[in-house]
Amino acid sequence: MWKAVVTAAVAFVLLFCRSSTLDNGLARTPPMGWLAWERFRCNVDCVDDPYNCISEELFMQMADRLAEDGWKELGYNYLNIDDCWMSMDRDEQGNLYANKTRFPNGIKKLADYVHSKGLKLGIYLDFGTHTCGGYPGSIKYLQKDAETIAGWGIDMLKMDGCYANVSDMSWGYPDMEMYMNKTGRPILFSCSWPAYAGGIKVDYSVLAKHCNAWRNYDDIQDSWDSVTHIIDWFGDNQDVLAPVAGPGHWNDPDMLIVGDYSLSYEESKAQMAMWAILAAPLFMSNDLRSISPEARSILMNKEVIRISQDSLGMQGRRVIKEHGLEVWTRVIENKDFPSYAVVFLNRRDDGMPYKYSLTLDKIGFDYDMDYELSEVFTGQHYGHYDLRRVLTLHINPSGVVMIYAVPMS
């Protein structure tokens, strides 16, 4: 039965990709990079806090870190500006321009610098009358703003939805995609349309024709509660969300906060593992200039990234939820039979690792064959398991065990 389900799911993904994907050739795997918002917000005080304010200097420093510290080689190649980069008014011709104090050389020069590092630059606009921070919105200037950012050499656009009517988004986001395509520059398009429309109250087949990724749910905050609320929402709505994810079009649960202030080491591993299982964009929002070795090791884990970047692009699903323990699985492309990534997520906080046992046939491993099991973060090899051999794990509180299962020939 599971083989038939997997085969049908793979066929659906391939058909969906051919018929519905935004035709810009981008985001064939979930995009990766760095985004300013969660960590640096709208800090425009470059007098008293020059090290942390939204400025040309901040983004140049982050570009240096991405390029020089090994992030770029792992796939973290987008450097994204968020809100509060603009001047408060457009110029006399109606053009947007950067705040001249904080971005004295303009966005084009910053893009040139980022490109010289082998990276790509993303920027933020808002579909409404104003951005969430009160800067000029784009609703009356979609074509002009598309031409402006293309002229600057922008590679990705995050378009927010503050100060806009949700009913206007059904034409506004497609129009912006059309105008960007007309510029001839490939620009990865991240939309906030479903987040403002109630998450699942949009036609995702339409959305995927115009957006490479989309925010579905609330902004992430620097807390474990925020991370788990997002995980819960994705699990509760997976029957709507999972079928529409795939190469060129991704559900986006928001930024990785690994390396910030609130998450423990176990919680940080859990967020990274869950975002990989969800086939989510991996955009860090942290300070790469001072990130800890522990956080760096999580974000740079090659096996987790390999799962995240699997070419099949199937979003994982929650298959078990019991006793404070969740099991999520994701089908991974394999030449003959599917491999699987499995996350055992311990939602308990009762002070000791939780002992959990199961057989692989309980989570959808329905081929009568052996699987080689290994743990992604520790590298521990569990050996060969058929469908009926009992696997016993100990999962730390608010932590994960992440298994990669490869069928044996």
Image (cartoon, helix red, strand yellow):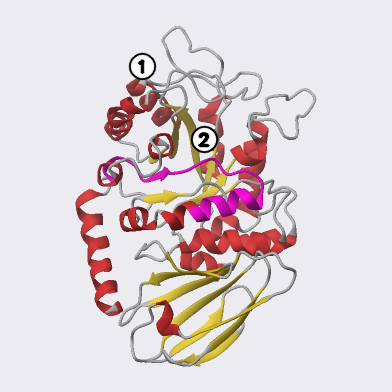
**Residue 347 visible from this viewpoint:** yes
Q: Nearer the viewer, mark 2 or mark 1?
A: 1
Tell me the quarter of the picture where residue 81 sits.
top right
CA neighbours of label 2 inside 10 A, class few (<14), some (14 to 19), many (20+): many
Q: Quadrant of the C terminus?
A: bottom left
In the image shown, does 214 or 366 lie closer to the viewer? 366
Q: Secondary structure at mark 2?
A: helix
Residue drawn at x 41%, y 21% as measured from the top left: 138
Q: Is residue 92 left or right of residue 28?
A: right
Image quadrant in which the N terminus is located: bottom left
The answer to whether residue 117 of the structure is visible from this angle is no
Residue 111: mark: 2
Q: CA distance from mark 2 to mark 1?
A: 25 Å
Residue 219 is covered by the magenta coloring: yes
Residue sitting farthest toward the front: 323
Residue 391: image quadrant is bottom right
Q: Which class describes the residues within 10 Å of circle 1: few (<14), some (14-19), or many (20+)?
A: few
From the image, tell me which residue sits under label 1. 140
